[in-house]
Amino acid sequence: MSDSIIDPTTPRKAPKPEVTKIQGRPLKPSTLMMGHGYDPVLSEGSLKPPIFLTSTFAFESAAAGKRHFEGITGKRPGGADGLVYSRFNGPNQEILEDRLGIWDGAEDALSFSSGMTAITVLMLAYASQNDVIVHSGPLYAASEGFVAKVLAKFGVKYVDFPAGATREEIDAVLAKAKAMAAENGGKVCMVYLESPGNPTNALVDVEAVRDARDAALGPECPIAIDNTFLGPLWQRPLDHGADIVVYSLTKYVGGHSDLVAGSIAGARKWMDPVRSLRNTMGGICDPNTAWMLLRSLETVELRMQRAGENAAKVCEFLSQHPKVERLGYLGMIADARQQDIYDRHCLGAGSTFSVFIKGGEAECFRFLDNLTIAKLAVSLGGTETLASHPASMTHLSVAEGRRAELGIGDNLVRISVGIEDADDLIADFEQALEHV
Ligand SMILES: *Cc1c(COP(=O)(O)O)cnc(C)c1O
């Protein structure tokens, strides 16, 4: 009989150490995406990992089963050192998590069934009754709603500050949050950021937030940041003082608009409480989706580079167009403080931006309805170009006053540029603007 795919006597990690360096220097993420964390020898030589469709895993011995459960239940930190049950872990998810961590320089990562599952399990893992969450604004609407409406049911309060806030403004908000927490008999349990904000593209000064957190709260209060819009290529928040980086993998990482998933990454001590709650609640990414994401990670750098180049060309065209009032694009920042944050934090301007059309809803709708290549859909980060109207779609539920405060006017169109030919895209935008 040939060796079985899961040979119970074979150690799960590759017996031969993986090559992670060449000529003394570490391999780059784009190289590691082709093989890191997977040894074909353990799976009949299959070049790509098989998809492990199983609900449970056979233990090599009773003692091994006990050891694995010590990891699952948190008696030993760092999770199980073997596979146990598919709500806790699986081979496809573990390979995915190993590879996701590489992009952000994180010790550990966890995958989830959606970006919102990642965010909600993360927050639930850190928030206790009477605690206060500090967050930047605007957040993705569902994240903001989870804090304000769901966590509120359990006595968790929040204080927010605008994305572009200065060190002094952040200090003031942290002092207020600390006072609120003391009054409630709780603590400030998390600083949660999203940068750039959607759809304004306002950047958060993560380094200033880290300094303010260190001064006011100490390092026990984690800083988490939703890096969906610029990560993993164009912004590396863990290098600037964030502790936990959060993704909707549905967007650039998945990159083909064909799956929904999420992740978090950071030092193992920050991941452990979240892993433990994920073990209880479920919400781990399924093996098929994990496999699709491994496929996507092989091209994430290529796709993001091309989308970024396309966006620069498209924005150059749009910025000169007489029917365009202005752009909210990180490659063309008007504000000196925002430019300073960009220069310190960002490695690229991304491919998702706002176009302010001269006029209002009617003009935007004519523009959107006449696009032929760009599809009219919400979401971002896919291979295809998408366009939407936030005021009447993604941000319709936001109160009008708050919308105005966030700069989400009726004349704002949101565009996520894909990897099509840039000249074709420009021609499409040009002819659609003729109808305005
Ligand atoms: C899409 C998105 C989310 C939610 O992710 P899902 O995968 O749709 O659950 C969270 N944050 C940002 C910035 C997003 O764009």
Image (cartoon, rainbow, N blue to C red):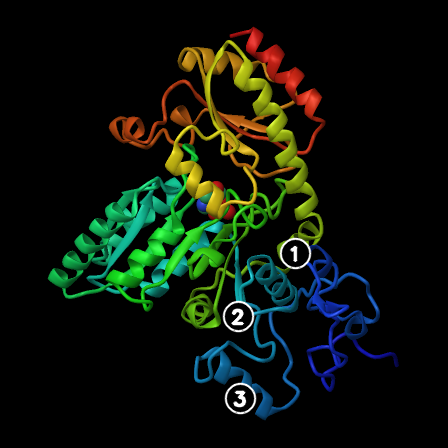
Label 2: which residue? 88
Mark 1 → mark 2, Cα distance in angstroms: 16 Å
Mark 3 → mark 2, Cα distance in angstroms: 15 Å
The disc, 1 or 2, on the residue closer to the chain's N-terminal end is 2
Residue type, mark 1 in image: Asn
Q: Is residue 12 above or below residue 99?
A: below
Residue type, mark 2 in image: Phe
Instruction: Categorize mark 1 by other alpha carbons within 10 Å: few (<14), some (14-19), many (20+).
Output: some
Name the residue located 33 percent from the left edge and 64 percent from the top edge: 126
Secondary element at image label 3:
helix
Q: Is 284 placed left or right of 337 in the picture? A: right
Closer to us: 362 or 220: 220
Q: Quadrant of residue 358?
A: top left
> What mark, if any, has residue 319 been given in the picture?
none
Q: Is residue 198 above or below residue 105?
A: above
Residue type, mark 3 in image: Lys
Name the residue located 37 percent from the left edge and 37 percent from the top edge: 337
Label 3: which residue? 66
Mark 3 → mark 1, Cα distance in angstroms: 28 Å
